[in-house]
Amino acid sequence: MPVPAADTTWERLRAAYDPDAFLQQGGRVVAQLAAYLEGAYAGKGPVLEPTDPNELLGALPPIGHAEPAPGEFERLLGEVIAQANHVHHPGFIGHQVSAPLPASVLADMSSALLSNGMAIYEMGQMHTAMERRVLQWLGGQIGFGEGSDGVLTHGGSLGNLTALLAARQAKAGYDVWTEGQRGPMAVLVSDQAHYCVARAVQCMGWGAKGAATVPTDDRFRLRPDALEETLKQAQDDGRQVLAVVASSCSTAAGSFDPLEEIADFCEAHNLWLHVDGAHGASLALSGRYAHVLRGIERADSVTWDLHKLLALPALNTAVLFKDGQRSYEAFAQEASYLFDDSAPKEWFQVGQRTMECTKRGLSVVAYTMLQSAGTELFRANVERLMEVAHFLADEVEASDDFELATYPDANILCFRHVPKASALSPTELDEHQARLRTALIQSGRAYITQAKLRGRLWLRTSVQNPMTSRETMTQLLQDLRALA
Ligand SMILES: Cc1ncc(COP(=O)(O)O)c(C=O)c1O
């Protein structure tokens, strides 16, 4: 391609930044997305069009192989939409991401345009103030007092790592951050915890045994009576145990660990209590469902994903510390070219409390939505998702050809189809679930996941989208029966 003359390059650049062109293009894209949403809500088309990855890649030209053309941007967005897993489709009952509120996406867009990185206050003044307000509000929902603080991060995995780094610094008994670790450490965590907890301790160099596994009960909840034994085993193994990580709730089965008993244990043994509430902390918003979080106010730290049950776009996670000063212990980095040493632990020093340096304006999305749509809307969303999940649980329980793994406390449900009058071996029954799931996804009528619990395979739904209704669930069971 010939190199354009300098003035042509400038003209091109200026055109690409032109506000009028942005207005026109923005109008077209919003119209495209609004039409998409209308179709998705109406259940138009398959939830997911499963496509072979190599076929998809092969059909996508390498960058630089096409001449920039008018309309290309919208055409490409159309292709992305066509291949998406449609989270606004009522039949999306799969992974734990929300169907974002359309307005929250506009907030996200404005955050992207302003591109204020938030590493320091000057690079995101209002972003920083909004982050404080969001954290205060979330802290209040789980019973943390005035002194609580924290940080917003990109995702629950990073959130859990952040909290565990603070736990290590708080409980090690020496300055691990500066000196490095003197010996192997561990946290106690149930066999149902999300893999990111093990990943976090392995990132900290504790190895696989750094996540000492506590067995669970018949409802997949951590067994408090087994904590003592697991602690002793880890200590006998030469490890310094620092914390218990409780799941509120677990990923596969949606089970809530008993926080009161775990908090008693932590108090008795001077351990940090971290609650992984990535999925379930949002139940705190509902008087009807919050009882499963009883004791969460006794945690030292809590991770809470706003992109799971609070209808915000991924990713948007709060890491909350009951004692706000602890939030500075995860990362005690000095950087004179960036951080203001004269006010090292003020609330507005966001960049000192997260792994991220430049960070997207997550707070802008959360604050503008909570304030403009009203917190009540978010409570209503949580309750709607829970009601529909419980409807499915009741239908499964009442049927003679489906069974539940356990009655759900969250909007996550594991169940399976058990063909009538046929004696399948456990392995055949597992294979039957896997086949059913594949067939269901290929039919395009719904998208669900699967999970192994105690070695057996279950179909798994997580109701994430308020467009998913009781009718969707009745239809889901009918579809599964027909495919079986
Ligand atoms: C309990 C729990 N913790 C942590 C995570 C990880 O969160 P993220 O995907 O936001 O990193 C998940 C994700 O599903 C989860 O269910």
Image (cartoon, rainbow, N blue to C red):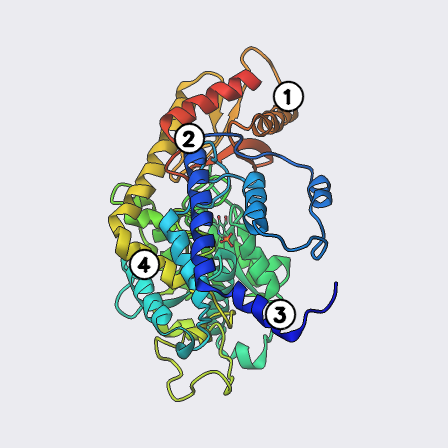
Q: Which residue carries the number 1 mark?
A: 425
Whole-angstrom CA distance, mark 4 to mark 2, is 28 Å
**Along the line of sight, which residue is nearer the eye, 362 or 283?**
362
- Nearer-N-terminus badge (4/1): 4
Find residue 8 and name its label: 3
Of badges 4 and 1, the one in the foreground is: 4
What crowding class fits label 2: few (fewer than 14 Cα within 10 Å), some (14-19), or many (20 or more)?
Answer: few
Q: Which residue carries the number 2 mark?
A: 42
Give amino acid for label 3: Thr
Of badges 1 and 3, the one in the foreground is: 3
Whole-angstrom CA distance, mark 4 to mark 1, is 53 Å
190, above or below 137, in the image = above
Q: Where is residue 365 in the image (x, y as percent from the top left)?
A: 38, 58
Of badges 1 and 2, the one in the foreground is: 2
Q: Where is residue 341 in the image (x, y as percent from the top left)?
A: 43, 87
* Residue 69 in view here: yes
Q: Which residue carries the number 4 mark?
A: 368
Give amino acid for label 4: Thr
Q: Where is residue 389 in the image (x, y as percent from the top left)?
A: 39, 33
What crowding class fits label 3: few (fewer than 14 Cα within 10 Å), some (14-19), or many (20 or more)?
Answer: few
Q: Quadrant of the C terminus?
A: top right
130, above or below 344, in the image = above
